[in-house]
Amino acid sequence: MTDKAPTPPLALLRALFLTSGLGSIIVVWAMRTYGGFEGVLDPDTAQLLAFVFLGVIAVNVLVLAGLRRFVERAHADRKPTLLLMGWAVGEGGTLLGAVHYLLTGGTTVFIGGAVVLLLTLFVLLPLPADKRPAS
């Protein structure tokens, strides 16, 4: 008898990534809006940081597009692991956006990160289609 790990419930895990990513946006927005937290970077540094973070998010999108090809070709046993890896990369863009917003108050990276997360979860790496035979 072989011990095989059960397949994780991907819909639940995707919901957790979505909640975590969007939750970080809400928490950071609340800190800036109601907590009186002001940006700590001067405008030149903030602009440089925005370019760097947007570059990292663009690289994330390229990685996700490449990972999508691996997911499409992967054996069914490997797909959950690859999806989780991709969703984590997508969530990284959201966290970068939240950090940038907290430090500078700029919303460009903030919104860009959220868009990348949503695209990752629902377009680039959606849940695999259920391929059970019709009865």
Image (cartoon, helix red, strand yellow):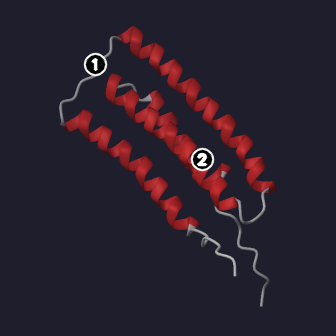
Which residue is painted at 28% across and 18% down in the image? 40
Q: Residues within 10 Å of mark 1 (few under 14, many from 20)?
A: few
Residue 77 horizontal/vertical position (percent):
71, 65
Which residue is painted at 19% across and 38% down in the image? 34
| Residue closest to the far bottom | 135
Which residue is painted at 78% across and 55% down in the image? 72
Q: Classify 88 as above or below 14.
A: above
What's the residue type where badge 2 is placed?
Leu
Front residue of 107/52: it is: 52
Is 89 positioned to the left or the right of 70 in the image? Answer: left
Is 13 positioned to the left or the right of 101 in the image? Answer: right
Q: Secondary structure at mark 1?
A: loop
| Residue 65 picture quarter | top right
Front residue of 64/74: it is: 74
Residue 15 horizontal/vertical position (percent):
48, 61
Q: Which mark is residue 119?
A: 2
Quadrant of the snapshot with the C terminus: bottom right
Residue 100 horizontal/vertical position (percent):
40, 27
Q: Classify 112 as above or below 6.
A: above
Q: Which mark is residue 40?
A: 1
Mark toward the start of the polypeptide (1 vs 2): 1
Quadrant of the snapshot with the N terminus: bottom right
Q: Residues within 10 Å of mark 2 (few under 14, many from 20)?
A: some
Cα separation between marks 1 and 2: 30 Å
Report the mark closest to the observer, 1 or 2.
1
What's the residue type where badge 1 is placed?
Val
